[in-house]
Amino acid sequence: QIINAMPNVVTYSAVISACEKGERWELALSVLEAMRRHDVVPNSISFNAAVSACAKQAQWQRACGVFDRMQDYDVEPNVLTCSAAISACATGEQWQHAIGLVGAMREIVLLP
């Protein structure tokens, strides 16, 4: 029996998470972009996995870019998102950006 199912936010997020675990940050970002093209709205899980995928591969600029894109979808960053972005900045020796992210955490009432 063939099931005709369209991917949704859960399936896309699972793929992004798998990309993170497989150290494939480029593919994680491609999947995040595919969500937009297919009118699937990413959620915090999607963004957390994408930011983490970038952070684990020392892609601090891309991690911060994904973090910034969250507001385009009205998705609030959470402690996991902020921690991953801060970690990416630390790996890239971008302390100014890390401090800015700590400030952002305070603005959204997340305590470090």
Image (tube, rainbow, N blue to C red):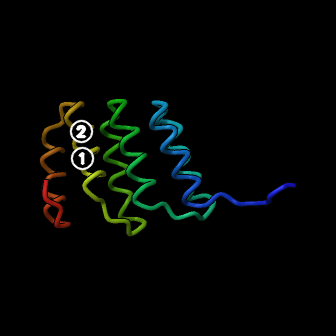
Q: In this view, does 22 lie to the left or right of 58?
A: right
Label at residue 4: none
The secondary structure type at the circle numbered 1 is helix
Hey, what amino acid is under mark 2?
Ser
Q: Name the residue under label 2.
A: 87
Q: In this view, does 83 lie to the left or right of 30?
A: left
108 above or below 92? below
Hey, what amino acid is under mark 1?
Ser
Give the CA separation, mark 1 to mark 2. 6 Å
Q: Which residue is drawn at 43% across and 66% down?
A: 73
Q: Mark 1 points at which residue?
A: 83
Q: What percent of the width, then of the height, locates residue 106?
A: 13, 62
**Which is more toward the observer, 75 or 22?**
22
Q: Do the residues labelled 1 and 2 touch (CB within 8 Å)?
A: yes
Quadrant occupied by the N terminus:
bottom right
Q: Which residue is drawn at 35% across and 33% down?
A: 56
Q: How crowded is mark 2: few (under 14 residues within 10 Å), some or many (20 or more)?
A: many
